Amino acid sequence: MNNKLLVSAALAAVISTGVVAPAEAGSKKEKCYGVAKAAQNDCANLAGTHSCAGQSSIDNDKGEWKLVKKGTCSALGGLSKKEAKKLYKANKSM
């Protein structure tokens, strides 16, 4: 019984990956810093205080990033990685 459940779960995972991956493959994305809401960041922050998605603690932290459609970051009020690093270093030295 347990093996059937395991096989079913594995099959569901494989099928869902096949459905999602092609949809994302065609869309170009870029990291956009300063637009993620609290707990909505996509991965590690510039400060190095965490390394996982969903661990940001405040909205629009300039050190947190979210993947957005390429070319939309500045329109959302975000920063490129280069701009965010420059701002982070400037604030760190104060």
Image (tube, rainbow, N blue to C red):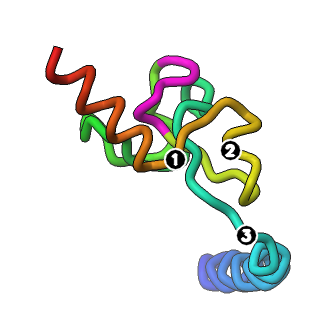
Q: Which mark is residue 80?
A: 1
Q: Give the magenta-colored segment's residue range.
A: 58-64
40 or 67: nearer the viewer: 67
Q: Which residue is mark 2?
A: 73
Q: Which mark is residue 28?
A: 3
**Can you name the residue that lies furthest to the left here?**
93
For residue 77, side relative to residue 20 (left or right): left
Q: Point out the frontmost of discs 2 and 3.
A: 2
Amino acid bearing label 3: Lys
**Where 15 sits versus 51, above or below?**
below
For residue 43, side relative to residue 23 (left or right): left
**Can you name the residue that lies furthest to the top here?**
94
For the point 20% across and 23% down, the residue is: 92
Q: Secondary structure at mark 2?
A: loop
Crowding around mark 2 (Cα neighbors within 10 Å: few <14, some 14 to 19, many 20+) is many
Q: Secondary structure at mark 1?
A: loop
Name which quarter of the figure residue 69 lies in: bottom right
Q: Secondary structure at mark 3?
A: loop
Q: Is residue 69 magenta?
A: no
